[in-house]
Image: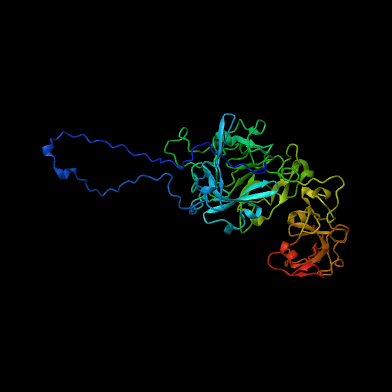
Amino acid sequence: MTRTHIQASITIILTAALIAACSEKDDASDADADAVPDAEIDVAEDLPVESDDPVEEEPSCPPPCPSAPADHEVFGQPCLSELDCGSGNRCLTESVEVYDGETYVSWLGGTCALWGADEAGCDPDDPTTCPAGTQCVNFGTSEGSTFFGCVDACSFTDSSYNPLDWNCGCRAGYECNLNLEACMPGCAHDRECCEVWEDLNDDGVRDDGEVYFDSDCSNWCDADDPDEFPADDCMASFACINEGDPSATYHAECLFDSDCPRDSRCLNEVYYYDDETGEPYYPGGLCLKDRCNLFGRDCEAGDEGDCVNLGSTADPFYACIAACETGHGPEDGDLNPCRHPSGGPPYTCSPYDTTRWYPGTANDGLCFPAMVPAADPDPLFSACTVDEDCVSPKGLGSCLSLMEKPPLCAAFCNQHLAEDIAICGAPDTAGDVAGICALDICLPVCDTVRGDVGANGCPTATGLPDLACYPNDDTYGGTSHVATGGTAPAGFCLPACTSTADCGLLWSGAVSCNTTSGVCG
């Protein structure tokens, strides 16, 4: 695995046993009584006395987990090799490592799973590719292939969506990952919860210079350790509990989870970066709190974060993240609501669909890395190869490819940015505009709706894709916006389609392509 494979938490427990019996019987107390000669004993008195009091049953440990999926007969079971898992299945075998006096164990006792590269694995977007009782997990990329596996499923919440504080549905030594709802290797010890491991030589072993430790960290591992917990504590989550930095906000730079607010994590430069360029996705790190729509996991006052759906409507993923009001960017200096991380590009307030925000927020943007152009960038709606080719108003520029066609310079926008900031272009003296905010991006305008490609008023230039003129109404882009004082154009330009397949890349459903106008539908 490359270092892009985010290391799952691992456990110190070295036994392959499952969960030890942990109930404690009450000691019986003898009643004081005078000795009675054997001859005087009434035999009937030795018989059990009937009682209306309910008989207390020994509690099961762990208790039943009614919200967890039914266990798969093989997947999730301990294993030593593929022979223990049945034909076609794999064994994720236990691995043990000792580093700097601490013991790390991954996949305690081994676990049976489906495992494969690319199409040979499962599909996280298609639950039917995994058997009932399991979840499809992306295990990262190695040597050009992405590996997927079906692992034992679990439940992070009860039936009322209250987060559980134990590993419901998982074996001892495994945590129920709150996002995957799958049983993944749990933490080993408190120190592991304060570490970041960068496997620089990709050998899968912790070496000196690869492990960073936060000495001020107060995080701890909720492991079933009889040295730290009562011997009958069978309610461990085997997860790292992030106490966080009380002074941290979601705008803070971070390397460790402990640099972030409580219960959140750090999308740091070590684990989150582009495989091709080696550049981090979030320079300086970005704090995130998963599943803020659950009880007790909401964004807290003072953290300067809002709860936003970062997934889709059909598959939502709510998280607390640094929020802001759009309209300011890197060029605004101290007025920029987002930070300038050390040694990296600044962040900017990127517009985000307000229908995806959890109720109770007034913001309309999220802090994400700003696009910083190279010297003498090209204007909007010109041909480009990489983002840096393009002008970037408020840090929101992009070399954007739609329908897998050649890209052009664009910028992300919303009503406020388009109307008040004129991010898509200011009107001329006649009120004409060169750009319009439609589909949440700045697009060139046109005057001959559904006109022939090349003769519809859309720009044409070497390197630009052929552009089609779509009507500026709610048929396609919904509500559109131009700079205040500008006149709304008849249409806006998008790459021209050449087939129905092209249309499917941009519009949902089976949409036909008019190859003369290049307009879908």
Q: Nearer the viewer, residue 237 or 170?
A: 170
Q: Which residue: 16% across, 45% down?
A: 44
In the displayed image of the protein, which residue is found farthest to the left? 39
- Horizontal and vertical percent for residue 36? 14, 35
Say which quadrant the C terminus sits in. bottom right
Let me know if residue 302 appears in the view: no
Which color scheme is applied? rainbow
Q: Nearer the viewer, residue 97 or 421?
A: 97
Query: For residue 510, which quarter of the picture?
Result: bottom right
Query: For residue 59, which quarter of the picture?
Result: top left
User: From the viewer's perspective, is 447 left or right of 282?
Assistant: right
Let me know if residue 273 appears in the view: yes
In the displayed image of the protein, which residue is found farthest to the top? 101
- Horizontal and vertical percent for residue 362? 65, 51
Q: Is residue 407 above or below residue 284?
A: below
- Horizontal and vertical percent for residue 430? 87, 61
Question: Total of numbered circles in the picture?
Answer: 0
Q: Which residue: 82% across, 62% down?
A: 445
User: From the viewer's perspective, is 486 left or right of 348?
Assistant: right
Say which quadrant the N terminus sits in. top right
Query: For residue 354, which quarter of the picture?
Result: bottom right
Q: Which residue: 77% across, 44% down?
A: 330
- Horizontal and vertical percent for residue 148? 62, 51
Q: Is residue 383 above or below residue 213?
A: below
Q: Nearer the viewer, residue 258 or 425?
A: 258
